[in-house]
Image (spheres, rainbow, N blue to C red):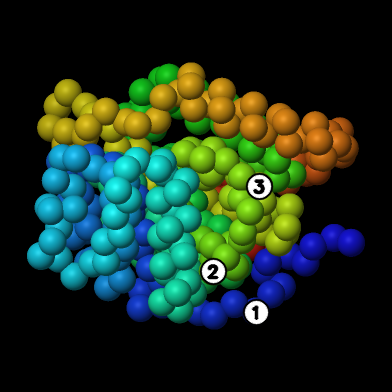
Amino acid sequence: MQNPSPASIPAPTLTPERIAVVIPALNEALRIRDVVLSALRHCPNVIVVDDGSDDGTAEAITDLPVSVLRHATRMGKGAGLRDGFAEALRLGFDAVLSMDGDGQHDGNDIPRLLAAANRYPGWIVIGARLRKRANQPTYRRLANEFGDWGITWGTGYQIADSQSGQRLYPAAVCALTDIPGEDFVFEAQIVMSAAQRLGTRCVSVPIEARYNQVHGAPTFRPSHFRPLRDLWRITSHIVAQCVRRGGLWQVRRQARANPPVIDDPSGEFASAAPLAQTQ
């Protein structure tokens, strides 16, 4: 039996008061305060998960009105997201918006992701780094495109920037259990599990790519994401799952028939699909 479309499932109208921003952080003392402040400007509910930092990450935000969960030792980004999701659900929020703690995500994009979530109720919303893509290092862009290709096989539909960590997850997705995979593999797997178990789709919202630059850009710490290592982990994980599930040609045909959905009222990105055609 085919899973129902998430758009057909009644979902509450999301407001800043009804969502939580979850920020996994590992040694982010350089930027964590700015990230938290940018999130608080648009959402009063911020949960920081300090993944065993030893550089004073948690101490940098002790005076801010946020919840801080601390891991005694490093457990990985997947564990950070799981714990943040669990805390948000315990507090009764209707959705979680995740941001990385290194400053590459801008809190000013929160209203746009929230608006897209209300136009596509029940969908995962991804902040896709489509604007100023020239700022993105070539190796990262190629790695992201390869990741998009791989996750397509696990979901049965195409996604613009499936590797972005700035996402809005409905509560039903956050509540999924037995999601295999740690670190960055978790972010790939939760999208695939949501597609396979709930019929959930993703919609992408164009955001700006923010990376270290020579002239005038903020300084970011080196990314924890290692393209060769982490893409191998993600890809091998996806391939193993697809082989076990079977029906690869059927998935390929399904994916070709479902191009990326981009929510962009400005019309800048021509690949945006009308909402009526995606439900």
Q: Residue at x 68, y 66 (%)?
A: 6
Q: Amino acid at mark 2?
A: Ala
Horizontal side of 90 relative to 8 (left or right) equals left
- In the rendered structure, are the residues bearing label 2 and label 3 in contact, judged by CB atoms less than 8 Å apart? no
* 134 relative to 175 in the view: left or right: left
Position above or below: 58 against 271: below
Of badges 2 and 1, nearer the viewer stands: 2
**Dot 1 surroundings within 10 Å: few (below 14), some, or many (20 or more)?**
few
Q: Is residue 1 visible?
A: yes
Q: Is residue 140 above or below residue 42?
A: above
Quadrant location of the N terminus in the rendered image: bottom right
Left or right, residue 3 beside residue 91: right
Say which element carries label 3.
Answer: helix
The label shown at residue 192 is: 3
Q: Position of residue 276 (x, y in %)?
A: 69, 65
Which residue is identified by label 2?
171
Q: CA distance from mark 3 to mark 1?
A: 22 Å
Q: Is residue 277 visible in the rendered structure shown here?
A: no
Discs 3/1, front: 3
Label 1: which residue? Answer: 10
* Label 3: how many Cα within 10 Å (few below 14, some 14–19, many 20+): many
- x, y (%) of residue 77? 42, 44
Secondary structure beneath dot 2 equals helix
Which numbered disc covers residue 180?
A: none
Residue 5, percent from left and from top: 73, 65
> Residue at coordinates 67% horizontally, 34% vertically from top-left?
238
